[in-house]
Image (cartoon, grey):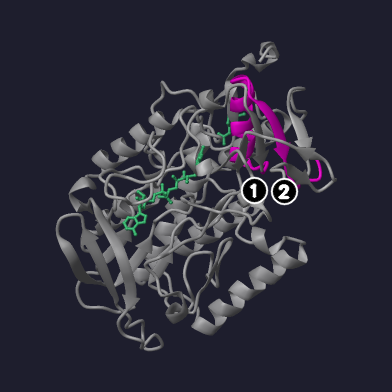
Amino acid sequence: MERLGKLRVAVIGAGAAGLCAARHVLSRANSFEPPVVFEQSARVGGTWYYEERVGTCDDSRPIHSSMYRDLRTNLPKEVMMFPDFPFASHLPSFMTHWDVQQYLETYCKSHDIMPHIKFNTMVEEVKPISMETDEGGAVRWEVISRGMHEGHSTQIFDSVFICSGHYSAPHLPSIPGIELFKGKVMHSHSYRCPEPFAHQSVVVLGAGASGVDILFELVQAKAQVILSHNKPALTFSLPLEIQQAPPVVKVQDDGSLLFQDGSVAHAHVLLLCTGYNYHFPFLGQKQLGLEVQHHLVAPLYKYLLPPSFPSLFFIGMCKLICPFLHFHYQIQFALAVLDGTVQLPSRELMEEDAEKERQRKIQMGVPVKHLLQMDSDQWDYYVSLATTAGLSPPNPVIQSLYDEVAKRRRANPQTYREINYRLVNATEWQVLNSPSVEADHI
Ligand SMILES: Cc1cc2nc3c(=O)[nH]c(=O)nc-3n(C[C@H](O)[C@H](O)[C@H](O)COP(=O)(O)OP(=O)(O)OC[C@H]3O[C@@H](n4cnc5c(N)ncnc54)[C@H](O)[C@@H]3O)c2cc1C
Ligand SMILES: *[C@@H]1O[C@H](CO)[C@@H](O)[C@H](O)[C@H]1NC(C)=O
C-alpha cells in the first residue's frame, strides 16, 4: 500500500494481544503513528486480570474474565512467553494468574504503552468508510467508542486490530427441559473456586481444558462429581471418586438428568464447561462478508484477515495454540502488510487459499466446530508468517517442550504442572526438578 504520512492503527482491547499489537506499532515509529488502544475496563491484562465477582461490573458491563482463583497456567512459561520478553526467572514453569498479570503489566510499562490506552472506553462500532477495496486498499475505518463519562467519539483509522478475546461469551448448549432442573445451572465462565461445592453433587459437562481442571478442584474440595462428556475415551485415568457419563440429553420432569446411555442422576449443580462463542458486537459482519458462528469466523486469510478487507486484523482467533507466540507472529506479519513490506495476493487468491485450507482440514476429518483448532499445525503457520514477513521463526526448542508438556498433560492432568523446565539453547530443554515421581499421593 502506498501512502503519504504515517498509518493510524486502532487496537481493540488491552489484553495480551492488544498490548503486543501496541508494542510493535510503537517500535515502528517511522511508518506508524502511535496506536490508539481502546479498553473497556480500567485495566490491562484482559483474561489474566482475575475478577472475583461474577455477572456484571459496577457499570453493568458483563464481567470479561473467565479466570478462576486457583488456576495455574497449562503452558510452561518457557513456551508461553512472548519470544522477546521472558518471564521472571524466579517463577516456576507453571504460573498462577497473578504471575501472568504481573508479567503483562511489566510488559506494558517496559514498552511505555500506558499513555496510548484509552481505559473505560468501549468500542461500539467499527465500519469501513470507503468501499474501494480493489483500488489499492483505500478503505479506512471509522471507530465509534463510548467512554464511561464522555459520551460517543468517532475516530478514523487506516487499520483496526481486533484484540477483544474470545473466552468471555459462554456457549450454552441447548438441553431440552433445562428449565425443569431444580439445582443450579452455571457456566465455567462464572466458576471461581471449589469451596461452595463441598459435599454437593455436581455434574460437569465437558472435558476440555477448563472442564478437566475444575473437575479436580471440585474433587479435592469433596464434591461428588460426575464428568459428562462425548469424548470416546479419556487418555488418563480418573480418580475413583469421579464417575463418568456420556452427554446429558435432557432434563426429565422430576428434575433429574438423563444421559445418552439411559442412566439418570440427580444433582445440585450442573456446571457447563462447554466453551465460548466468538462474539463481535461492534462489527457489521454482513458488510464485511464474514460468517461468524459460535465456533467459527470465516473466511480469514492466514486465520488473520478477511480477504475483502485486508486492513482489518483478527488477532488470536485460533484455539489450541501458544497464544502469546501466536500474537507475536500475527501482529508483526500484519504490520508488514500495512507498511508494504509484505505484498498480499489478490482478494480472489486469498479467498481460494482460505477455502483450500478449510477443505484440507475437512478432508482430514476435522469437524466444522474444530476448524479453528491448530495444535500441531501451529508450527508451520508461525514459520510461514515469519518467512513471509522476514522474522526469525520460533526456536525448535519451543515446539519440543510444547509437545513434551502435552504428552505429560494427556498422561496425567493432575500432576504435569509439578515439573520445572529450563531452556538450554535453541534446540534443547532440560528438566530442573521432577517431583512428580514422588507425588503419587496427590
Ligand atoms: C480460564 C482460561 C485459562 C487460560 N489459560 C491459559 C494458559 O495457561 N496459557 C496461555 O497462554 N493462555 C491461556 N488462556 C488463553 C488466554 O485467553 C490468552 O492467554 C490471552 O489472555 C488472550 O488474550 P487476548 O488479548 O486475545 O484476549 P483477552 O485477554 O480476553 O483481552 C481482551 C481485552 O479486550 C477488551 N475488550 C473486549 N471487547 C472490547 C470492546 N468492545 N471495546 C474495548 N475493549 C474491549 C477486554 O476488556 C479485554 O481487556 C486461558 C484462557 C482462559 C479463559
Ligand atoms: C544445545 O545444547 C546441547 C547440550 O549441551 C548440545 O549438545 C547441542 O549441541 C546444543 N545445540 C545448539 C544448537 O547449540
Name which quarter of the figure residue 33 lies in: bottom left
Local SS, label 1: helix
Which amino acid does the dot numbered 1 rest on?
Leu
Q: What span is in magenta?
A: 206-234
Give the secondary structure at mark 2.
loop
Q: To which residue does mark 1 refer?
A: 180
**Residue drawn at (77%, 28%), measured in percent from left and top?**
237
Position of 10 relative to 165 (above/below): below
Amino acid type of disc 2? Asp
Query: Hey, which quadrant is residue 152 in on the image?
Result: bottom left
Marks counted in the figure total: 2
Indicate the quadrant containing the C terminus: top left, top right, bottom left or bottom right. Answer: top right
User: Compared to 37, does 359 lie above or below?
Assistant: below
Q: Is mark 1 within 8 Å of ligand 1?
A: no
Q: Earlier in the sequence, mark 1 or mark 2?
A: 1
- Whether residue 31 is visible, yes or no, is no
On screen, residue 131 above or below 382 = below
Q: Is residue 4 left or right of residue 404?
A: left
